[in-house]
Image: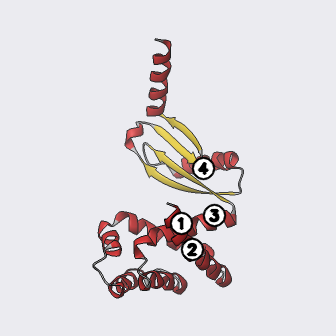
Amino acid sequence: MPLLNAIATPYAEAFLQVCEARDESDLAFQQIKDILAVWESSDELRQAMTSPVLEPAAKKAALELLFAEQVTPALLNLLRLLADRNRTAVLDSVLNRYLELYREMKRIALATVRSATALSDDQQAALRRRILQVAGTESVDMDLTVDPSLIGGFVVSLGSQVIDASLSGQVRRLGLALARTA
């Protein structure tokens, strides 16, 4: 991954500087999360943007058609630049790197939360408060996903820390404890 980071970081850093100068970094943060959601949910988009057969001009036109009305001119220019330089294959890496740099700058912790069922607003708020205490930051960005294989409960990943409050985790730990006593 170091090579990918070496490609993505200069674009992300430059874009962050542009956004800061225009006071659009908060808006870009949300818009990038929206673009990445589309990227993750669309095999066709990923295949088109990573295809060596499609010309950069066609990729640029597709990105403009998809996102021109939803993003700031600066973000649209970044997407165009990536297409012009034939870097759309690393588009998600550039955008994810921007999110990382933004979080570092704003001291926002990233918590990945997998839960057996969708969490209610009250549950999310309570979990957010607890994560803030553990993270020691003023803000947290929670990436929520539903994972029925957990059976019940949730798993929170916060940096290198993992908090497993899932039923499947409890069963696994119980099995390990029983194996040690046998």
At 44% from the left and 27% from the top, the residue drawn is: 171
Which one is earlier in the sequence, the residue at label 2 or at label 4? 2
Outermost residue, front side:
3
Mark 1 and 4 residues: CB-CB less than 8 Å, in contact? no
Q: Amino acid at mark 4?
A: Gly
Secondary structure under the numbered disc 4 in the rendered image: loop
User: Of the numbered discs in the image, which one, if any, rests on residue 12?
Assistant: 2
Which one is earlier in the sequence, the residue at label 1 or at label 4? 1
Which corner quadrant of the image does residue 168 belong to? top left
Q: CA distance from mark 2 to mark 3?
A: 12 Å
The residue at which mark 3 appears reads as: 103
Q: Position of residue 56 (x, y in %)?
A: 36, 84
Which of discs 2 and 1 lies nearer the camera? The answer is 1
Secondary structure under the numbered disc 2 in the rendered image: helix
Q: CA distance from mark 2 to mark 4?
A: 21 Å
Q: CA distance from mark 4 to mark 3?
A: 12 Å
The residue at which mark 1 appears reads as: 5
Q: Is residue 178 visible?
A: yes
At 53% from the left and 51% from the top, the residue drawn is: 112
Q: Amino acid at mark 3?
A: Arg
The residue at which mark 4 appears reads as: 159
